[in-house]
Amino acid sequence: ATVARQTGASAFRIAASSSGAFTRRHASSGSGLANLSRGTTMGPSAASTCRSSTSLASTMAAPAVPVMEAVSHPSYEVVQTDHITEFGANAILYKHKKTGAELLSLSTDDDNKCFGITFRTPPTDSTGVPHILEHSVLCGSRKYTTKDPFVQLLQGSLQTFLNAFTYPDRTCYVVASQNTKDFYNLINVYADAVFHPRAISDPMVHAQEGWHLELEKLEDDLTYKGVVYNEMKGVYSSPDSLLQREAQQSIFPDNTYGVDSGGDPTDIPNLSFEQFRDFHGKFYHPTNSRIFFAGDDDVLKRLELMDEYLNDFEENKESRPSSQIQWQKKRFAEPVKVRHPYPVSDNGGEDKETHMIMLNWLVNDEPLTPKDEITATILDHMLMGTSSSILRKTLMESGLGDAITGGGLMNELLQGVFSVGLKGVKPENVDKVEELIVDTLTKVAEEGFSDDAIAASMNTIEFDMREFNTGSFPKGLSLMLGTMREWIYDRDPTDALKFEEPLAELKERIASDGSAVFQEMVRDLLLNNMHRTSVEMYPSKTLEEEVLNDEKTRLSKIKESLDEDALQSIIDKTSELKALQASEDSVEDRSTIPSLELSDLKQEVTEYPIAVTENEADTGVTVVRHELGSTSGIVYADLAVDISDLSIEDVPLLPLFTRLMKETGAGEYDSVALSRRIGTHTGGVSVSPLISGVNQKGAKEGTVTTGEHFVTKLLISGKATADKTDELFGIFDLILRDAKLDSQAKIIEMLREAKAMKESGVQGSGHATVNARIRSRYSVLGYIGEKMSGLSSLDTVKALLDQAENDFPSLLARLENIRTTIIASRSCRDGMILDLTGDASVFEKIESSVDTFLNQLPGDANGDKLQDFYSEPHPWAAQAKAEMAAEAPLIDEGFVVPTQVSYVGKGGRLYEEGEEVSGSTAVVSKFLGTGYMWDNVRVIGGAYGGFCQFQPRDGIFAFLSYRDPNLAGTIDVYDGASKALLQSAADLENDPDALATAIIGAIGDMDGALSPDQKGAVQFKRWLINESPEQRQKYRDEVLNTKPSDFKEFAERLSGLKDASSAVVSSKAAFEDANTAGKSFTLKEVM
């Protein structure tokens, strides 16, 4: 986990933009870090209100849940009952009589049930004790005695969310599941973990998860190891993270937010086991807890279950008062300036000598009213929410920097902060950026916002809020994060979810005074507020080396101060810890972890509605419809336009082209007017390339494809209420035909921003970089994807930027050719697909709009037929294959960046083209990742994440690590995987329970909760790739019937992984050490 900006997804009080330091333990789902190392990203918040002639409230309704009487239990008193009409939730706030613990029970119609328990955990230093404790409490407990019950739950539950978060002032533990039995299993493990963890009695847990001195031989150098220690070294390698840290600490000099709850690597080794244990005793008490439930499960069962744990305790009168968060007063007489270095490569030229500058305001030092909070959210959107928002637009168009820093309003903690600035700033322009920000805010305060700007922002926010679309992210968790915004500070939790009243108040104020309410807020909270800091980060070519040398010097002094007996004690403890980490849990310990039975699993694949009409109404366009039970009056639409006539040389331009379609204006609309039209009438519009492999006609399903058959589309996506469908389709047609591609200044701005973001991505998300690089060597689609968004695209962006600045006419010609090729093709209509998701009422209302739209689309309804990509190879395939030998050779590559950690990848071909891939591979791959990889890369190796990925369609398998202190050693771990898996296959022959656990976990990955638009998208993708329901069921059956022999076959294939190669993102020093250890790489300096 890293110190990162986090956003929730529900009411405006959840925070449309959220707070700074937010650390996460592990992931529960998703790509990239698979199931091991990255917290699930919170969806964007949707906060607020609408000012248009037709209120979205009239067409979007919350689910109707009958008001219920409060359920009583003798161990609790009912504090209050409430019905939250905005989300169709019945709320009961309880207080546990014996301990004083508060429990909020939300009853909704959502079967994705959610539980969370949150403790206020304000640190007083940067040793990272809340973060280390968050990791540690899930490493075994009184009832659940394995080394890491969290992993057992990952391996063998149907969880839809399983995670823990460390904020600057609180720690949250959250689970969710659609299966009631599984849900209660998860709650039991988490409740026992937080109240009775092994960690407070076993120093080995603190050593493993936090930090320890490691020494194997007397003559060796001492080293620091620990999962959180290495995680935070990764965080502190990121310039963006360093900037955010300095900003938060500068604005909060007097309270708990002025230290790093995640931990500073230089301070983490100062945390003793006794301090760690005492922190748990002080804050992890029921009296200091907030317990949350949401979903359709039984309220009485919730109360009974938690009472079993709470009854072990008496009320602690000191627990809550000692955890209260103190207000940071606005005490600066004048703005404060802060300067700090950030690391850059020592080979950087003048173009690398750029600074970052960010201005930060402490927004409030007393609670804001609900109306003020919603006003601030709308103001933030008008200033920063889109590329046409005035403050963001002014900064980006100034040419003073390459990309925005800060995200505007962050109001998830006790006090809000507003931050904004630029990165990629020349030293002489730093002061100009600060002046421009203040001048722009002054202009806003004087001139205000236009009516259409206000309407667009308010409609955008209100649509998101009322839609309450959290995707696969549990709605219950979004509601919990929303309540916690108030509840954790001893305020009313349900007030945080109510927006109708403050919304009405704001609309009334706007109706009478227009923009004045926003102008007043700019003056009061920003311009007249002297509690402001400007944080400047300047480049240092020596910082990385200085940090490494400081650590070496510190460790050297420690070693010199110890006698031989003390050093031998460290050697013994190192050996003891490694033996513990390598040991297997006993059968008795594993039996303590509650689990499901295979009979609890759903046997059938869930299919979603789909109706396909080719050449609808003789328009030449294929229309795909997904009629669901309810979509709350919203239509979700995707227009897919074929782009196969483009040359492969233009494919790397698609990310730029698709962004231009939406952000530079179209037809009579400039960029601002287009953005406001989208915001006023829709729930959002996006444009992206869609490139997907498909099953070849006549080929056996479930086999590795040749990689030559795929579809390539330009996907224009959007959503709107049914009565706004004409507007939505009008925008689709407008940006497809008439997007303005000729703004040189805007293109240069976009390319500079893209360059900055890609460089930052390599440094902070190196696992994604190396994964894409590995896959580009074996797969046509992997190669094309890497050209568009991987490391190769960074070189492309640099070249395009040079072309935009020095030969713009030729770049413009390429962009215009892309559009002409797409819409002027004789087969344009035949290559179009309109995919619609809605309910019966929506489809009835939009029928005429669909007919009109289909007839006005470009192309000839009687034009040529498109090439059949399901029978013939895609025209890009042959050239891509020819390029791969030169551009993506099978070599071990190392990408050098300034960093204190490594991202290590190795992969190859596990299955050849035409070979059948069983569903059992999903079970084995997950088993390998959550077992061997977890134990050896993360637990023993100390990396924040270790995982593996297998793609059945292309047969490619890859090992990956995240924020890894090792490089050569991690590759050795990868090379030992097949042998370990063979042993596991033998062990499973006599352990049917372990096999069942692995199967359950794989099914859990397949059966996540989906929002209405996701259901439509899933079924559309199934149809697009030409996958039959029979094949899906066959794959699921193979998962359910996985045998130990399947593990053996997978292991044997893994031992002979074909054409294996590695890709690593790391530092120059780490590559030098790896070379000494016999692992050599072809190196490339990235930054």
Image (tube, rainbow, N blue to C red):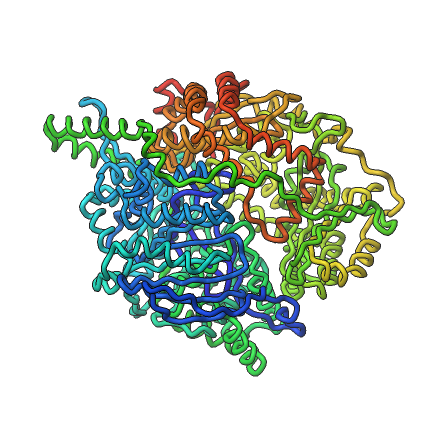
The N terminus sits in image quarter: top left
In the displayed orientation, state which residue is furthest to the front: 74
User: 233 above or below 430?
Assistant: above
* Residue nearer the viewer, 1041 or 220: 1041
Foreground of the two, 681 or 813: 681
Q: Could you tell me residue 593's position as x and y percent?
A: 37, 39
Res 53 → quadrant: bottom right
The answer to whether residue 434 shows anywhere in this view is no
Query: In which quarter of the view is residue 1070 placed?
Result: top left
Q: How many marks?
A: 0
Say if residue 144 shows up in the picture. yes
Q: Where is residue 20 in the image (x, y as percent from the top left)?
A: 39, 55
Which of the pair 886/590 is nearer the observer? 590
- In this view, 617 is above or below 346: below
- Quarter where residue 169 is shown: bottom left
Which residue is located at x 18 percent, y 46 percent? 274
Q: Which residue lies furthest to the right in this view?
A: 862
Residue 765 in percent (x, y) is at 46, 40
Whole-percent x, y for residue 588 in the image: 32, 32
Give left or right: position of 980 versus 63: left
Q: 610 and 679: which one is in front?
A: 610
* Residue positioned most to the bottom: 512
Q: Which quadrant of the figure contains the C terminus?
A: top left
